[in-house]
Amino acid sequence: MMVATEDAIRIRGLEKSFPGFHLGPLDLNVPKGAIYGLIGANGAGKTTTIDLIMGMGAKEAGDIHVFGFDHIRDEVEMKKRVGYVSPDLNFNAWGTVRRLIGFIRAFYADWDDTYCAELLDRLKIGWTDKIATLSYGSRTKLALIVALAHRPALLLLDEPTAGLDAISKRELFTELLDAVQDEERTVLISSHNLDDLQRFTDHIGILHHGKLLVEGSTAELVERYRLVDCLSRDGQIPKTTEGLIVQRHDGDRWRLLVDSTQHPLEALEAQGLTEITATPVTLEELFVGLVKER
């Protein structure tokens, strides 16, 4: 039975353990039609989360629903609606591009042959190309073609730009932007390319050591935080103040990452700070600052 939800992906209480690592409990919401960037350092839990959505590995606790479908009980119905790209995918066993596509298209009644051919042409992948001889970037493009050709409602992209040169990254993001023009299509993408994610996404979740630090609209999160340079009269900054994170200091001068919803500039002055200047943050500065606290 489907669960009524406004989210493309709804995760509640998800947990999974490996030696030296524990994911969760994780609650995560990816709205329908959103381009959601899941970011975190290596080992933060991004790939584990995406793998568990796809049913690769057994979760220890929690629920995962995709368009209201339980990811295990309704696996077939769910996967009809999902395109998946991962650097771990290996298509060498099919030999050529034509054989691979011929095999995969049989699983999708809505496979679009014309669109598939257009993608192959635009990304410069040949029908007769031998998969084993393709460059790393071309294998990633092939995985994207296979994921897109049945026009899925949800794209799960795990580090799709890893190992790509600047030109290949631009080609890949161009295709992704074209593919998601339909506001009904949803994307969950994990990546270390934070500049690209700041331009490309409209929602962000930041994972650290298996915990979700923040989640929300990309624009609102970036707007919410400020880098503040200031002078402390007594040379001290309250270290336990929520929403105020020390980035560096030199004597009485400090740089802070400040949650402006908790600490407006006027409130900082009331705490004894002077010569306050505030500048907007990039997504990378926000990520580094939030992780640094921990």
Image (cartoon, helix red, strand yellow):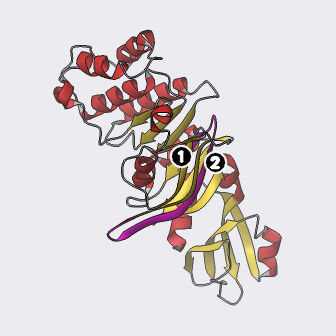
Q: Is residue 121 visible?
A: yes
Numbered marks: total: 2
In the picture shown, does residue 3 fall above or below 186? below
Tag 1: amino acid: Gly
Outermost residue to the bottom: 234
In the displayed structure image, the side of residue 260 where residue 44 appears, left or right: left
Check disc 2: other Cα within 10 Å, few if <14, some if 14-19, many if 20+: many
Q: Residue at x 32, y 26 (%)?
A: 142
x, y percent for residue 178 = 53, 23
Check disc 1: other Cα within 10 Å, few if <14, some if 14-19, many if 20+: many
Q: Residue at x 65, y 87 (%)?
A: 236
Q: Is there CB contact under 8 Å for labels 1 and 2?
A: yes
In this rendered view, identify the residue nearer to me: 30 or 195. 30
Quick one: quadrant of the N terminus? top right
Asked if the magenta segment contains residue 19, the reply would be yes
Residue range corresponding to the magenta coloring: 17-37
Chain-order first, disc 1 or disc 2: 1
Of tags 1 and 2, the one toward the viewer is: 1
Q: Residue at x 70, y 63 (%)?
A: 278
x, y percent for residue 172 = 42, 30
x, y percent for residue 139 = 28, 30
Q: Looking at the rendering, which quadrant does residue 34 occupy? A: top right
x, y percent for residue 257 = 63, 67
Q: Residue at x 67, y 60 (%)?
A: 225
In the picture shown, does residue 132 fall above or below 120? below
Give the alpha-carbon distance from disc 1 to disc 2, as whole Å. 9 Å
Outermost residue to the top: 114
Q: Where is mark 2, residue-wise? A: 218
Q: Which mark is residue 37?
A: 1
Tag 2: amino acid: Thr
Q: Is residue 196 visible?
A: no
